[in-house]
Amino acid sequence: MAQIKTQTLARIDWKSITWFVGLMGIAIVLPRFIHNQFVTGPIVNATLFLGAYYLGNGGAIMVGLVPSVVALSSGLLPLPLAPMVPFIMISNAILIVVFSWSRKMHFGASAIVAALAKYLFLYVTALFVIKAIMPNNFAAKAMATMMAWPQLVTALVGAIIAYGIIKLISRGENA
């Protein structure tokens, strides 16, 4: 019986578990303490790119579900944008899947395509959702802006951060 348990533990991918726990920790803790979209956004997007790179789609999407809920509960995402949370989650999944699918091309090219896909989905969705919940409201325009170009910028900066981390890790593994 002890032999079976030892063999089962040996099959556990501890590297993937470590990556998952680490990325999930960043996604949960960071938005609770840093309330700036241009700081939190790139770091959260970096976790999505790193998750896609090291964990694959399933693990990365699980990590990508957490940040928007934490951002809403911590005040980073204004309460009137609560209806956007499911769409933010979907946009994170889009970033992950598009990046994973196109990563065979080139890291930079696939990161740009993924960031653009996330941005376009979120921007178009925000136009409809925010207009439906707050028609002709100045605050609605400000909230729609949060879902527009800042999403593209933070995703691209997140890709640069992730690329740097991947290069540092691969350099360390090859040393």
Image (cartoon, rainbow, N blue to C red):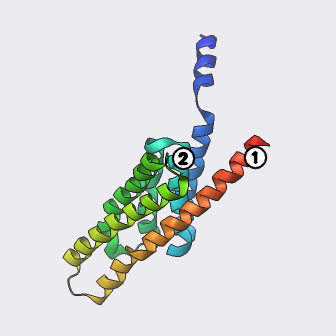
Left or right side of 8 for 67? left
Q: Quadrant of residue 89?
A: bottom left
Label 2: which secondary element? helix
Q: At 35% across and 74% down in the image, what residue appears?
A: 79
Task: Say few, some or many: other residues with alpha carbon within 10 Å of mark 1 (under 14 / 14 to 19 / 20 or more).
Answer: few
Task: Say few, some or many: other residues with alpha carbon within 10 Å of mark 2 (under 14 / 14 to 19 / 20 or more).
Answer: some
Q: Which residue is mark 2?
A: 53
Q: At 29% across and 82% down in the image, what residue appears?
A: 140
Q: Are marks 2 and 1 in contact (CB under 8 Å)?
A: no
Left or right side of 126 for 165? right
Q: Quadrant of residue 57?
A: top left
Looking at the rendered structure, which numbered label has been put on residue 61? none
**Vertical side of 58 occupied by 44: above or below:** below
Badge count: 2
Between 149 and 75, the one lying in front of the other is 149
The x and y percentages for residue 164 are 65, 58
Under mark 2, the amino acid is Tyr
| Residue reaching furthest to the right | 175
In this orientation, does residue 138 appear? yes
Q: CA distance from mark 2 to mark 1?
A: 17 Å
Q: Quadrant of residue 90?
A: bottom left
Q: Which residue is mark 1?
A: 172
Label 1: which secondary element? helix
Under mark 1, the amino acid is Gly
The x and y percentages for residue 4 are 58, 13
Q: Quadrant of the N terminus?
A: top right
